[in-house]
Amino acid sequence: MLVLYFFVLISSILGAFNVLYGANLLQRLALFLLSIWSMWWMQVIYEEGYNGNHEVLEVTALAMFAAGTIQKTLKWRKR
């Protein structure tokens, strides 16, 4: 599960600071806040262990959304 949080963290940071991703300021700030949140949850899980079933669903959904956004951005840039 930490690997998925790390993927969300890295993709959020890359999306927030990447000029290829056509986002406005609020979207970039949201991505940056999402990266901070992911880093915080990684620390909580590392220190306290697995906290519950909701984490699996939320981090899987975030990772799938991040992967889909990366795929969409790369496909759009090729045009």
Image: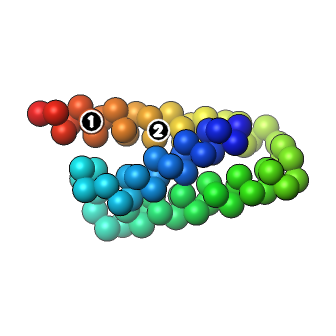
How far apart are labels 2 and 1 at the CA level? Answer: 14 Å
Would residue 36 be found to the left or right of residue 56 on screen?
A: left
Would residue 23 be found to the left or right of residue 28 on screen?
A: left
Asked if one can make out residue 69 in the rendered structure from this viewpoint, the answer is yes
Q: Is residue 20 above or below residue 3?
A: below
| Foreground tag (2 vs 1) | 1
- Residue 26 image position (x, y, % from top left): 36, 66
Q: Amino acid at mark 2?
A: Phe
Q: Is residue 77 above or below residue 14?
A: above
Q: Residue at x 19, y 39 (%)?
A: 77
In the picture, the quarter occupied by the N terminus is: top right
Question: What residue is pinned by disc 2?
Answer: 65
Tag 2's secondary structure?
helix
Q: Residue at x 65, y 38 (%)?
A: 3
Please tell me how crowded label 1 is: few (under 14), some (14-19), or many (20+) other residues with Cα within 10 Å: few
**Residue 74, numbered circle:** 1
Q: Residue at x 23, y 32 (%)?
A: 75
- Residue 7 image position (x, y, % from top left): 55, 42
Tag 1's secondary structure?
helix
Asked if one can make out residue 27 in the rendered structure from this viewpoint, the answer is no
Farthest right residue in view: 48
Please tell me how crowded label 2 is: few (under 14), some (14-19), or many (20+) other residues with Cα within 10 Å: few
> Mark 2 or 1 closer to N-term?
2
Q: Amino acid at mark 1?
A: Leu
- Residue 53 image position (x, y, % from top left): 79, 38
**Residue 56, numbered circle:** none
Q: Nearer the viewer, residue 13 or 65?
A: 13
Q: Residue at x 40, y 52 (%)?
A: 14
- Residue 36 image position (x, y, % from top left): 58, 63
In the picture, the quarter occupied by the C terminus is: top left
